[in-house]
Amino acid sequence: MSAPVKGGITIINKKSNFVARADQEGGAGEVYTNIHEGINMYTEPPTNTISLHEFSKIALDRLQVLKKIEFMFDSNSADDQVRKHIKNMTKAHRLLVEPKTIYDRSNGNTIASALQADERKEFKENDNISHFICRLAYCRNEELRKWFITQETRLFNIRLGEVSPWTVKQLLESKLDITYQELRATDEDWQKFEKNITFKHEGAVKGAPALPSEFVKVPFKEAISLIGRRAVFLHQGMAYVPIKELQQIAAAHFRAHLSQDLVKAFKYLPQILKDERLSQMLINLSNHSAIDFNLYEGKAPTDADKINLADLDFYSRKSFPPCMKSLFTALRNKHHLKHYGRLQLGLFIKGLGLTVDETYQFWKQEFCKKIDEATFEKQYGYNIRHMFGKEGKKQDYKAWSCTKVIGQTTPGNEEFHGCPFKTYSEDPLRQLLSSYGLKQDEMRPILDKRRENLHQVACLRLYDAVHPHGVSDNVGNHPNAFFNSSVEYTKSLEKKKAKEGTAQAATAEVAVEEAVAAADVEMQ
């Protein structure tokens, strides 16, 4: 239902678990939250005030986290790496939900959280608000719901990994009104079925036998997600579950309830969409593939980091990602690129630190091998200056992210824009990969990801193959991240070689001095 409020519209939907108000007088809006302590299963709607600007920003921040989770899972990143990266990212976006005491499952130890009380409160509220906003954006169809549920469940699992299994047990009991009965040595069940219950399970302390207190007895239907793995013992409608497996049960409940809540939210969405500003925001949020999500923020290059125009050919060989290398090569060969190719490559080299004058010179040098300078200025000069915010509406355009590049229209005849992992057939793609110095067996894992339509992961695999043991943070999310990481990798190798060379020279100098000293002794 909805009710008028002075100066605005209030939309209250208890069944969709959301309350929102947009101020009609331009700028302020409200979203409400009342968040409980502990891990959030998002059962309570938001109930405090934020502006419309914050409404949009906080949701975009959360979607960046969810997109990063998707990318890291698709690229088979190690669990510890995922947990560490997502924790840092949520903290940077002020969305970190962390218990006061963090549990280390590898050794059973606990450490105190570094978050202050006011930070913990703010972060929890931000987390809750952003989740419910994204619910509204992602409830519109089955495809959006599936994506949102998958990434949110992964985030929930990451957070569960920082609390003890007994805390997970308490969470389930408090939210589901179900008792997870811990076994005791005196229980008849334990005495009768101990070997069955502890089959394949060791104790919490490595090498120690499993204790009865490390298992709980629950109704069979609570452990359905574990049965396929044969992780539980079943008897007379009851499941005997290792307490460390309760995380999977909690995640299954989270997924099921979120799925139901998204369907409910969709039923009441038309009432919320009556406010045009909220409507447009939610549509933009859900269209995550069209939004230019720069997970790589990209710092402005310093004078020391900027690339000279004369250096582009050198860096294009191994430091340009395939989407830019293919455009750069086509430009050098054909002395021309069509509109989308010019835009894709032009914004990329702008992001390398080239000025508007240098960029103008770059295109002029190549295009004027076919046309005169007057024609070049007439046809292309305005667009180059516009790209830098010097013409038209004075907007300073950013380099395209991988999402933006992949989402471009399929290249037509004599067009080379887009992502080669998406648009190239296998033979041309192999030829492009070989230009990085890769052998056929090194291409195999890259091409495997490409066949799975994991284009960004394929690009990450290429980077790893060309830069062994290099730092690849945000590679696969942004072409400029590929370039910057590659250049840093090259610089670090040069420093290492220079250091080794200095050490060798010093060693040789000492050897010469010792030889001279020995010769002097002999002469004496």
Image (cartoon, rainbow, N blue to C red):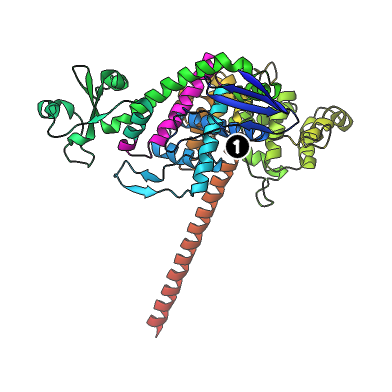
Residue at (49, 48) in percent of width and height: 117
Three-letter code for the amino acid on which mark 1 is drawn: Arg
Snapshot quadrant of residue 175: top left
Percent from the top left, x then y, of residue 94? 55, 41
142 part of magenta stretch: yes
User: In this rendering, does residue 512 appear at all?
Assistant: yes
Q: Which residues are magenta?
A: 138-167
Q: Count numbered badges in the picture.
A: 1
In this rendering, the answer to whether 264 lies above or below 126 is above
Percent from the top left, x then y, of residue 107? 29, 45
Snapshot quadrant of residue 47: top right
Residue at (77, 37) in percent of width and height: 388
Q: Which residue does the numbered mark 1 point to in the structure image?
A: 317
Question: Is residue 510 found left or right of 202 in the rendered image?
Answer: right
Most common secondary structure along the magenta stretch: helix
Q: Decide: few, some or many residues near mark 1? Use Cα within 10 Å; few <14, some 14-19, many ≥20.
A: some
User: In this rendering, does residue 438 appear at all?
Assistant: no
Residue at (30, 37) in percent of width and height: 166
Question: Is residue 292 found left or right of 364 in the rendered image?
Answer: left
Q: Residue furthest right?
A: 374
Q: Quadrant of the N terminus?
A: top right
